[in-house]
Amino acid sequence: DVKVTQSSRYLVKRTGEKVFLECVQDMDHENMFWYRQDPGLGLRLIYFSYDVKMKEKGDIPEGYSVSREKKERFSLILESASTNQTSMYLCASTVRDRASGSYNEQFFGPGTRLTVL
Amino acid sequence: GDSVTQMEGPVTLSEEAFLTINCTYTATGYPSLFWYVQYPGEGLQLLLKATKADDKGSNKGFEATYRKETTSFHLEKGSVQVSDSAVYFCALTLLMDTGRRALTFGSGTRLQVQP
């Protein structure tokens, strides 16, 4: 069975702390994504990675960085957490796009609800 | 840029009622279209998809048809159940400047089905 896991379901941090959110997938997928989900805004793409050590900015990368040292693991880093980063963070993965351009389904983890005080 | 617009919720229905959740999009080229569902306390999971015009995606009694002429991908179900209560997201592929693809999502529509 397909599996994307995230290190924590709930996390509470203080303003200014460095925060690591971990995501692991067991499907040998090349592409991995980090989104944040906020009421009324849907999901917004923060960063994605299409290969080990490769990354690309999404719609809202400011205040975040990422790390992809191994194919199965994609980390989201908040260098100095702020209250406006309180949100639900979702990780997803998918296989590489094929030459035809058809897009494969993304598989999501259960999410990490982060509260920054 | 490419975007997805969904009807705002919540949508509240009685069991066995007919469901429609509207989704329209703007996009360059020919995106693939998706409906994802998020049950309480869980991540998103794919409900159905369509990759070209006039395709109909279907799953678990839900259907949506890719209408290029009206740029729409409305979600329908003939008879909803309490277990269908969830948040539904419409999404499309987004071709980024680098040539890579990602998904762009609508804001989500919460469905509440009452017994």
Image (spheres, helix red, strand yellow):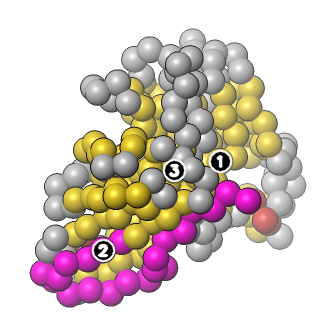
Res. A18 image quadrant:
bottom left
The N terminus of chain B sits in image quarter: top left
Residue B18, placed above or below residue B82: above
Of badges 1 and 3, nearer the viewer stands 3
Q: Which residue is mark 2?
A: A20
Q: CA distance from mark 3 to mark 2?
A: 18 Å
Please report whichever mark, 3 or 2, sits nearer to the chain's N-terminal start.
2
Mark 3 residue crowding within 10 angstroms, few (<14) / some (14–19) / many (20+): many
To the question of a shared chain for discs 2 and 1, the answer is no
Residue B93 location in percent, x, y? 48, 31
For the image shown, how many numbered marks are present on the structure? Answer: 3
Q: Which residue is mark 1?
A: B46
Res. B113 image quadrant:
bottom right
What segment carries the magenta color?
Answer: A1-21
Chain for mark 1?
B
Between A57 and A14, the residue placed more toward the observer is A57
Q: CA distance from mark 1 to mark 3?
A: 12 Å
**Tag 1 near tag 3, CB within 8 Å:** no
